[in-house]
Amino acid sequence: MKIGRSRKRKQAPSWPELTLEKRAKFLGTALIDLDRLEFIRAPGRKDLEQEKKWLISVFQNDGCDPLFVEHHIPAIIEHDILQVALSNSNASSDGLLSEQAARWPKLTLPNDVNLACLQGRLRVEVAKSFLPLERRWWAVDLYRSGQFQPPTFANKLTRQRYQS
């Protein structure tokens, strides 16, 4: 029997390490207009009509709650854009880190900026048909840009949410 060399795989970070990494990059939570959220469609991913139907039934039965912590959308933002948005909104970064949803600022992003969201595209698509125009915003967890590769970080966030 021939014995081959084993390949060493790069070990994925443990959940405590990932939690520490997330905390280090986490800037806080803000309310963002749904039309300012941008999603990168994963290659090979379909429209997922079944998931859409399920979300519609959830929103019909339980309501569409953009503040519910399990429904937050993770997004990356550059430091200078966050500072401009805070200034435009007459808000401070203290509100971003509040544990009380009532203190999260509703950010006004610069006109030419949309947030790069790591997940939540279907949730936003369905929410647009449920929320009135004056309430078309969502709770977005903001993460510092330039410190991680978004697809990798998105996969880690997704796995952590659904395995913990």
Image: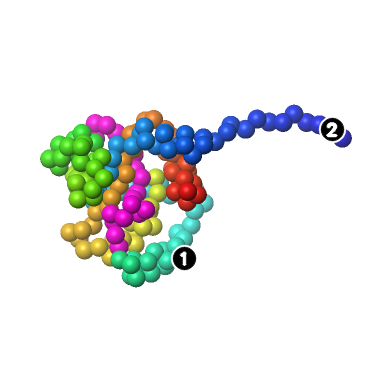
From the image, tell me which residue sits under label 1: 50
Picture quarter containing residue 84? top left
The residue shown at (31%, 41%) is 142
Picture quarter containing residue 94? top left
- Which amino acid type corresponds to the residue marked 2 in the rendered image? Lys
The residue shown at (57%, 33%) is 11
Q: Is residue 80 magenta?
A: yes
What is the x, y in percent for residue 104? 21, 46
What is the x, y in percent for residue 27? 29, 36
The residue shown at (29%, 56%) is 66
Quick one: SS at disc 1?
helix
Magenta segment boundaries in residue numbering: 64-81
Q: Is residue 164 magenta?
A: no
Is residue 135 shown to the viewer in this render? yes
Query: Is 147 drawn above or below residue 161 in the view shown?
Result: above
What is the x, y in percent for residue 161? 44, 48
Distance in Å between CA atoms under marks 1 and 2 = 48 Å
Is 7 on the left-hand or right-hand side of 33?
Answer: right
The N terminus: image quadrant: top right
From the image, tell me which residue sits under label 2: 2
Outermost residue to the left: 90
Quick one: SS at disc 2?
loop
Decide which of 56, 19 is in the foreground and name it. 19
Query: Is 125 drawn above or below residue 42 in the view shown?
Result: below
Tell which circle, 1 or 2, labels the residue nearer the N-terminal end: 2
Query: Is 47 drawn above or below residue 53 in the view shown?
Result: above
The tag on residue 42 is none
